[in-house]
Image (cartoon, rainbow, N blue to C red):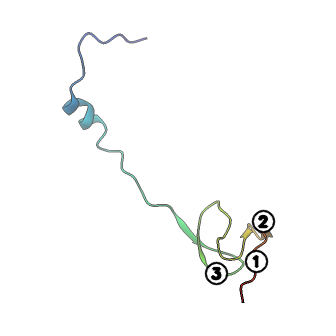
Amino acid sequence: MAHPKHRTSKQRRNKRRTHIKATPATLASCSNCGATAKYHTVCPECGYYRGKLAIEKEVTA
């Protein structure tokens, strides 16, 4: 294991981390209802995931 002789300064540490940027979640359209939903998640509008019913949604009148 590495054993540092000197402490890494805040500036040097932060310069190393500058290329990491947070990106917004990728959105896709639902194949069942066409609503916008995040990738790899159940559609919040209809409850379908990959063409199959995953969550039973209540019908509001």
The dot on residue 12 is none
CA gap, disc 3 and disc 1: 18 Å
Query: SS at mark 3?
Result: loop
CA gap, disc 3 and disc 2: 16 Å
Residue drawn at (26%, 31%), measured in percent from left and top?
Answer: 13
Badge nearest the viewer, 3 or 1: 1
Left of 14 or right of it: where is 32? right
CA gap, disc 2 and disc 1: 13 Å
Q: Quarter of the image containing the N terminus?
A: top left
Left of 21 or right of it: where is 24? right
What residue type is disc 1 on? Glu
User: Which is nearer the N-term, disc 3 or disc 2?
Assistant: 3
Image location of residue 23, percent across then percent down: 42, 56
Mark 2: few/some/many CA within 10 Å (<14, 14-19, 20+): some
Asked if the residue at tag 1 contacts the one at tag 2, i.e. Cβ–Cβ closer than 8 Å, the answer is no
What residue type is disc 2 on? Ala
Image location of residue 60, percent across then percent down: 71, 85
Query: SS at mark 2?
Result: loop
Quadrant of res 33: bottom right
Quadrant of res 30: bottom right
Residue drawn at (36%, 45%), measured in percent from left and top?
Answer: 20
Q: Quarter of the image containing the C terminus?
A: bottom right
Please, which residue is most extreme toward the bottom here?
A: 61
Image location of residue 56, percent across then percent down: 79, 71
Residue marked by disc 1: 58
Image location of residue 3, percent across then percent down: 35, 10
Residue marked by disc 2: 54
Residue marked by disc 3: 34
Mark 3: few/some/many CA within 10 Å (<14, 14-19, 20+): few
In the image, 29 versus 60, the foreground residue is: 60
Mark 1: few/some/many CA within 10 Å (<14, 14-19, 20+): few
